Structures are given as structure tokens and as C-alpha cells.
Image (spheres, grey):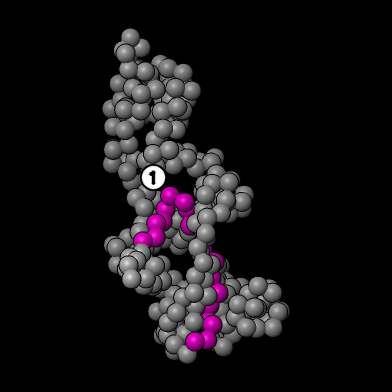
Amino acid sequence: MFKHTGLPNKVDPSSKVPLHNQVEQLLRTLIEEPRYQNGEFLPKEVDLANHLGIARNTVRHAISKLVNEGLLIRKKGVGTQVASRKVSTRLDSWFSFSREMQAKGIEVVNFELDLAALPASDEVAEALHLQPGTRVLQLSRLRGTRKGPMLLSISWFHPRLGLNGQEDFNKPLYQLLEEQCSVHPSISREEISAIAAEEALAAKLQVETGAPVLFRNRLVFDSDGRAIEYNKVYYQGEGITYSIDIERK
């Protein structure tokens, strides 16, 4: 049983308002509590049902309504949380994720940071204009905010940059490349699509298998037009929105 939350001990079965609507309104009040706004998981469905003296399916119905509205998110095997406010980023100018979030006053958390020197796959070799099998540095980062992961980013860097894996990749990436490699990332050629999260990716992003994920595939060039980074980013569907101004000609 969960601790006292300010919820009444029961709903009113004699009311003309359906039970699931009553529970929905109670949940709307509950999720405004600071602890839930700060990332604490909601009480379990069964505990809420016992507390209110109703069927678990009624609670599930109410929670599903708020999930569909984007106010709550279910994390498989973990629980239900208040959804983070979406982070909006622009397409007509770009920085590293760290720089974009810093500009918005959002603290970036690295949940995982892995480096490995690996033979380039055919896909990576083609993107960076290398021979397949050429060893390249691969950087994988699971990133987000204190509320949880928001994205998985995987980058492969051209060997001419001279990266050896000893660099501080907790720094904003393009700042690091400018300082350590004396290159200026200038152009990002991007493709953005929606995909369904396969099991391993879903576990990383703490979403259900098959949940919608925003996939960003990009190739970054320096000021001389040479490819320096091939990058794949997978964003939680509820975590990021992109905005762009389009001028009518």
C-alpha cells in the first residue's frame, strides 16, 4: 500500500459521473503533486484500486486516458510516471544535444557512455568514404535528464580526426572536435523518420517494445566539405519535437 497522497479513500458509486471519470479527475490532481512532477512513479494500479475500493480495470481505464493525452507514460516493468515536457529543437540551426539543452536551462545526464575502436561496417565505410573494415572510433551515449533517458546516440568518426578514445566525451561533442581536432563541423545532412522500438532499444529508452521512436540519421561535414561523423540517434517518441520555419516563396 502506498503512503497517503491526499486522495479520498473512495469514489462515489452513486454519482452520475462514471467511476473511471471520477478516478481520472483524482489522478489529474494527484499528478500535480511535486514529487510526481519530479519523477517519482505513481502508485501501482492494484494499490490505487484497493485504496479507492474499486476494480483495477477502472483505474487502468483512467490511467490509459491520461497516457493517451500524453500526461503520463508507462515504462514496461518499471511503472507509470508523469510525462516530461517535450523538448523542442530546431532544424534550421543545430548544435550538439548538450549545447541545445544548456541553452534551454535543462541539465543533461549521461546514463551510459561507451567507446570502442571497431572495423567499419559497409554502411559506415560508405558514409565516411572509407574502405570496409577500416578501424573507426564508435561513441555510444544514452542521454536524457534526471527524469530518465531521452535518446540513444551512436556516432562513428573519420580516422583523420585522430581521436584515440582518451578525450573527454562528457563535453559538448562539437566543442570537443573543435578544441581537440581543430575541425569545424559546418554542415549536417539529415534524414528523420519514425520507427518502432525493437526490444533492445526499448529497454535502453525505457519504453514498451514497439513504441514509436524518432530516428535521426545524419552525416556531418567540416568546413572543407569532408565527412567527419556518421551519427544515428533514437529519441523517445514523447521526448523530442522538431520545429522549423518555412518561408513561402
Q: Give left or right: position of 135 versus 154.
A: right
Residue found 39% across the figure and 39% down from its top: 69
Is residue 178 visible to the viewer in this orientation of the structure?
yes
**Vertical arrangement, residue 13 with respect to residue 204, above or below:** above
How packed is label 1: few (under 14 Cα within 10 Å), some, or many (20 or more)? many
Magenta region includes residue 98 = no
Q: Give left or right: position of 152 versus 33.
A: right
Q: Which residues are magenta?
A: 225-243
Is residue 165 visible to the viewer in this orientation of the structure?
no
Residue type pointed to by label 1 = Ala
Residue found 60% across the figure and 77% down from its top: 127
Q: Quick one: quadrant of the N terminus?
A: top left
**Which of 59 and 77 lies nearest the eye of the viewer?**
59
Q: Position of residue 146 (x, y in %)?
A: 38, 54
Residue found 57% across the figure and 51% down from its top: 197
Magenta region includes residue 231 = yes
Magenta stretch, overall SS: strand
Q: Quick one: quadrant of the C terminus?
A: bottom left
Q: Position of residue 53 (x, y in %)?
A: 40, 16
Residue found 39% across the figure and 56% down from its top: 241
**Vertical arrangement, residue 178 with respect to residue 168, above or below:** below
**Vertical arrangement, residue 151 with respect to residue 115, above or below:** above
Looking at the rendered structure, the number of numbered marks drawn on it comes to 1
Residue extending furthest front?
Answer: 249
Q: Position of residue 182 (x, y in %)?
A: 44, 89
